[in-house]
Amino acid sequence: MPIREIRILGDPVLRKRAEEVSSFDAELDRLVQDMFATMYHARGIGLAAPQVGVSLRVMVLDLGEADEEGLGPFALVNPKLVEASRKTARSAEGCLSIPGVEEVVERPESVVMEGFTPKGEPRIVQASGLMARALQHELDHLDGILFIDRLSPLKRQLLLKKWQRLQAEEVAS
Ligand code: NI
């Protein structure tokens, strides 16, 4: 299960709408395995295929101890949002593709998503709290949307400035 390189903000693959998966084959299986390995290596709780440079509608999630619903680890292929609560929640969010920064994002508090397992079996996921947030964050990735797009222009600008500073420091060190 090779670890793949995580694409960072600025990489155009993060801004493309990812394609539907059409064949549930060994290659998809490999992608999912590598995504799990990459996510665990980076200590993330979710990862979308575009983040490893593959423009396909695939996400993996594992909330570990925080998985209150006991759902994960799991992969969801061709996910669709079928229900979102009117009630929203605000909580800090970060992204492996924008390392080192986080900001509070408002999203529906609970969602229902349907999709497929990597074997092609239908799967419905019903979640609230952190899992609902992670599902929406990863689904956004598949549409080329990043969490910074859900901030006010001012907050977004401040966060990007901070991120650029961190990136420059990393290059310098
Ligand atoms: Ni992300």
Image (cartoon, rainbow, N blue to C red):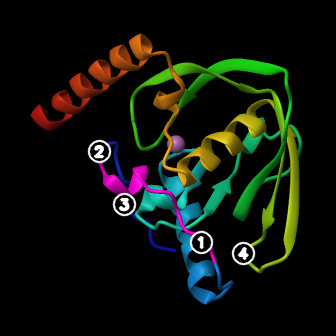
In this rendering, which labeled residue sits more in front, label 3 or label 4?
Answer: 4
Q: In which quarter of the image is residue 120?
A: bottom right
Callout 1 amino acid = Gln
> Which residue is the extreme one toward the left?
172
**Mark 2 sits on what residue?**
10
**N-term mark: 1 or 3:** 3
**N-term mark: 3 or 4:** 3
**Mark 3 sits on what residue?**
5
Whole-number angstrom distance, CA of label 3 to CA of label 4: 21 Å
Q: Which mark is residue 118?
A: 4
Q: Do callouts 1 and 4 mark residues in contact (Cβ within 8 Å)?
A: no
Please tell me which residue lies in front, 76 or 78: 78
Whole-number angstrom distance, CA of label 1 to CA of label 2: 25 Å
Q: Residue 151 carries which label?
A: none
**N-term mark: 3 or 2:** 3
Q: Which residue is drawn at 18% across and 27% down?
A: 169
Whole-number angstrom distance, CA of label 3 to CA of label 2: 14 Å
User: Is label 4 within 8 A of ligand 1 (CB to nearest ligand atom)?
Assistant: no
**N-term mark: 1 or 2:** 2
Residues in magenta? 10-21
In this rendering, which labeled residue sits more in front, label 3 or label 2?
Answer: 2
